[in-house]
Image: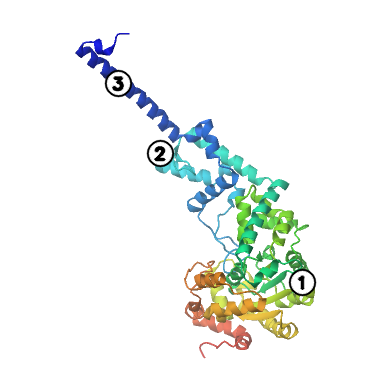
Amino acid sequence: MIPVSSLAPRTRQTVRTAVIALVSALALVAIFHLAKLAEHPVAQKESTATLDVGISESQIQVEKVYKSTAGKAVKKQGAGGDERGGDGLEQPAVPVAHMNLAHSPVQDMLARARNRAGGAMHPLLGVPMSPEIEEWEIKRLNRLDRSRARPANATEIKRTLSLVQTRVDTDRKALVSKDLRLWAPGEAPLRILLVTTWRSGSTFLGQVLAHHPAVFQHYEPLSPQGIKQIRSGREAIQAQQLLHRLLDCRYEGMADYLNYTRAHPEDMLGHNKIVWDSCRHGPNTNACYNATFLTQACQMFPIQLVKTVRLRLNLTQLFLNDERMNLKVVFLVRDPRATMSSRYSSVSWCTDKPDCSSPEVLCSDLEGDLKVATALRQLYPDSFTMLKYEDLASDPQEEIHKLMDFLGLEFSPEIAQYVKETTEKDDNSPWSTKRKSSDRISLWKKQLPLQEIHTIQNACESVIKTLGYEMAGQ
């Protein structure tokens, strides 16, 4: 080979120019291929493992995209809540874990993105996708959905229980109060029945109690009954049996209840943050609908809390009579005018259900409950208490402190802070528990027409006077 230095100056310049051109061309080719890889990262076999980050993490990311774009919350009718959840909890129309992604909100979202940007955008990476990559992504999400539809196996249940136990142990170690005794060997579990009616503040109160790390909350377990009150007869016996099993953490043989829970997962389990998060982030969400898993997860918590708006107070005496249950009843009442105002103005599922829409029915139930409450207070002074919503809203810190004393629990700084955060900031969503509570007490006077106030008062005069409220317009 002839050395470049031996060439004539013009020739040397020509060679240098050719070499530079060749290097530039190779660089352009490399940049082009890198750009194609960046545009279609999942098209390469090596990238597949990077994108398919595992069922749980990928599921979480798809859920976030779905909730923030295509899956804006819709009101769910007639499932079973109070201030929030159940009878109106905003959530996707179909839980992401059970979506049919062959034709789903995710696919619709991709189609809309295609129309806006001239091509579909990847839901996780936010980069353009060619038709081939879009098809591959839909197939991948379908595989993910099918794996989620499969019942959890023994290994997945064990791994999810381990996640729950880790969180429980962490919270217990951080608890430096007298409540550590709750986990002591031989200590009887504490059972709590929180009884009221729709739109009376029970979701807020339940969440305050569930903020204690020892609490497992059975949120509205009578929701499958629909928008109705359970007062007597066969329904009452079945309801008592169901509550007894739940308070004992016995989920075996409750296929109908578990199927309802699967259909309404955020309502029925979303109020148990540790358990619900462990299922969602674990190997298979369906662990949360497995009787073995729920039984063992429930038993990790030494306090069992049932919040219900469907059970009349006379049906709680069966539990109070059983000393082995170590059960306490919290009866929450509210001015019926405020209750009806909240039902009229905040939710739609109540209007065609007499047990919810009629002030006569509400106050007939309340009148009976108040007579029962007088007897229960005398028979079980250490196990029964009545709390007025208005007192709770006027001075939440003091009232929650007194309630925790009644339950034998410490009013910790963490619970005090939670109460402060949820009662001093107003959020007008009907399912929110963040309310400037002192402003809610007399809101019904502004919301209800005078004629409606008189109608409710005519039906509820005895209850209003018994509870010590003043009659309006007189």
Q: Residue at x 48, y 35 (%)?
A: 41
Label 3 sits on what residue type?
Ala
Q: Residue at x 42, y 28 (%)?
A: 33
Q: Are marks 3 and 2 in contact (CB under 8 Å)?
A: no
- Which residue carries the number 1 mark? 325
Label 1 sits on what residue type?
Met
Secondary structure at numbered mark 1: helix
**The disc label shown at residue 21, or none:** 3
Q: Quadrant of residue 401?
A: bottom right
- Count residues near mark 2 (Cα–Cα under 10 Å), then give few for <14, some for 14-19, many for 20+: few
- Which residue carries the number 2 mark? 118
Q: Is residue 237 above or below residue 124?
A: below
Mark closer to the chain start, 3 or 1:
3
Q: Nearer the viewer, mark 1 or mark 2?
A: 1
Q: Is residue 154 above or below residue 357?
A: above
Secondary structure at numbered mark 3: helix
**The disc label shown at residue 176, or none:** none
Mark closer to the chain start, 1 or 2:
2
Which quadrant holds the N terminus? top left
Q: Is residue 322 visible?
A: no
Mark closer to the chain start, 3 or 2:
3
Q: Nearer the viewer, mark 3 or mark 2?
A: 3
Label 2 sits on what residue type?
Gly
For the residue pair 252 and 26, the one nearer the viewer reads as: 26
Q: Nearer the viewer, mark 3 or mark 1?
A: 3
Q: Where residue 267 sits in the image (x, y, percent)? A: 62, 61
Secondary structure at numbered mark 2: loop
Q: CA distance from mark 3 to mark 1?
A: 86 Å
In this view, which residue lies farthest toward the top?
Answer: 1
Q: Where residue 345 sits in the image (x, y, percent)? A: 52, 71
- Count residues near mark 3 (Cα–Cα under 10 Å), then give few for <14, some for 14-19, many for 20+: few
